[in-house]
Image (tube, helix red, strand yellow):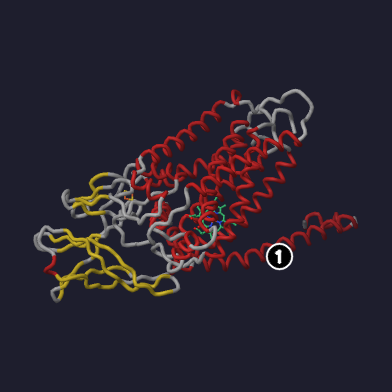
Amino acid sequence: MDRNMSHEETNPDSIQISRRKMMGVVVGVINLGLIASVVGPVIGFAAAPLGQKRKQQWIALMDEKLIGPGEVKEVTYSLKIVDGYHEVEQMYTVYLRRGTDDVICIDPTCTHLGCRVKYQTEHHKFVCPCHGGVFDDEGNNKSGPPPKPLERHPVKIEGGKVWISRDV
Amino acid sequence: MPPGVGWWQTLGNLIMTLLIFQFVTGFALAMYYSPSPEAAHASVRHITYDVTLGSFIRGLHAWGSSVIVFVVALHTMRVFFWGSYKKPREVTWLAGVVIFQIVLGFSFTGYLLPWDQRAYWATVVGTRIAATVPLIGHQLLVFIRGGEEVGALTLTRFFSFHVMLLPASLMAFMLAHLFLVRKHHIAGPVEPQKGPPVPFYPNQLFKDAIVLLVGVGLLIYLAIAFPPALEAVANPTGTDFSPRPEWYFLGLYELLKIMPPGWEVVAAVIIPTTVTIGMILLPWLDRSRSRHPAKRQWVIFSGIAVILLIGLMTLKGILETPPEHKAASTEAVAGKQTP
Ligand code: HEM
Ligand code: FES
């Protein structure tokens, strides 16, 4: 606009036009500002869960004696969690497997798209009902779409009980 | 109107009518519905079994979403094969593509609201698709769910989209679409027929009315003959529930099934995004002057390929639906499935 100034100054009409243009630009900027002043905070507000911090917690599951060597057990436990605006008692399921000496804890969340796998005792494998993923009894992916083994939770045995640790 | 406009041009009107039905029944449902994990299932149970005409209103709304998706797909194909997206109707087509996406958004968010096993697990799997996106997948997942897991904030989020953002955007794009259709008139047959323009009234209006009668009649029949079911309340513990999406997402679900491990992002994101971008760019990709299918063979060919892919995958999904689940979707049974 500057470049044309001298030329325009000689012509009252074009001063008029550049004034109009200028005001149009200012209105546009104000409008953008208005939009940004509401959309920006709303996006920040909606994205709040991204800032959520989770921390590890140990949970006592059951008596150590209840699971024998080579056995796989489905264990359900309850946990107080903060679910958005309220605290709830949430039930979760995990699988415990005792090898020759150690105990591992396998999370049933399928590593494909998150359905819950089911253990088939007679076949010694976990099967996912969604897209037919199959894992062996240690949770290693054997066939179907799952890209990696089932996740494990850290386990410790203390005071005769099996403890697992998970993010809460 | 140009001569040669006929039955195929009645679908838009049917969609609009069905959408109005959706607005009205949705407004009614929202009076009794409560979007919290404690109350959602109970409130939908209340709607379905206690409130006068509740099962019917909910049936209209739930079946309405299926019928709309079906008719929107038909309407889109009609416009595609007629080549009606060509100049000067590019923006009309564009608004249509956005409306298509909004309708799918409605269905995806609405499906969670009853908070039963079906709703919960379909959303667990459906939202997990976002996590297949490289780099930002996890953030995207947490943003969509409102947390690491599907919970109270997922429900309020989906509710807010379902009854606020999506209706408002749908309204805007629908008005734009209708305005543009009126402005540019309807395109008529692919090769203009001879003869003077024909009036909308009474012949086309009559065809429209017949189609509305059949479409809405079918909807009412479905709502009464197959009342909406409600399964057991959402249970995150369950290892014995086999989730399945609505029929119109089955194609995607089957596509996910056949992807080799590690390639799910192709089925989940790349293919649907490519198809959508293709649809958006269609009027500019297809530059041929003529609207005749024979004059734009590769466009027609790609279109048919996409339609066949979606159709076959959906068919595969329907055929592979375990029988137990067919029972579960028509009767109100608790969510116990054999794996
Ligand atoms: C202004 C518009 C709308 C409002 C206010 C609205 C409101 C609601 C409410 C309150 C529910 C929960 C009650 C229930 O689950 O039965 C619901 C469910 C649902 N909505 Fe909407 N809705 C609207 C439009 C739509 C549209 C356009 C579609 C689809 C294209 C749709 C698809 C669904 C679906 C699939 C469900 C789950 C139905 C079920 O399983 O019972 N809604 N809607
Ligand atoms: S979610 Fe388990 S195989 Fe797809």
Across and down, in percent, residue B4 comes to 70, 28
Residue at 77 percent of width and 59 percent of height: A24
Whether the residue under disc 1 has CB within 8 Å of ligand 1: no
- Total of numbered circles in the picture? 1
Q: Quadrant of residue A114?
A: bottom left
- Left or right, residue B198 beside residue B325: right
Task: Write down the residue under mark 1.
Answer: A30
Residue sitting nearer the eye, B188 or B35 = B35
Output the chain of dot 1.
Answer: A
| Residue at 24% in and 64% down | A153
Q: Is residue A8 left or right of residue B258?
A: right
Give percent across and percent down for residue B94. 62, 43
**In this picture, is B339 found above or below A15?**
above
Q: Relative to B147, does residue A11 appear above or below in the rendering? A: above
Q: Give amino acid for label 1.
A: Ile
Q: Residues within 10 Å of mark 1 (few under 14, many from 20)?
A: few
The image shows residue B80 at horizontal and vertical percentages of 59, 34
Which quadrant is the N terminus of chain B positioned in?
top right
Residue located farthest toward the bottom when viewing the structure as drawn:
A159
Placement of A80 over or under B224, stated as above or below: below
Q: Can residue B135 be seen from the camera position used here? A: no
Q: Nearer the viewer, residue B253 or B16?
A: B16
Q: Position of residue B144 (x, y in %)?
A: 46, 59
- Secondary-structure class at tag 1: helix
Question: Image quarter for residue A160?
Answer: bottom left
Q: Is residue B232 something that shows in the picture?
A: yes
Residue situated in front as seen by the camera: A159 or B188 = B188
On screen, residue B337 above or below B45: above
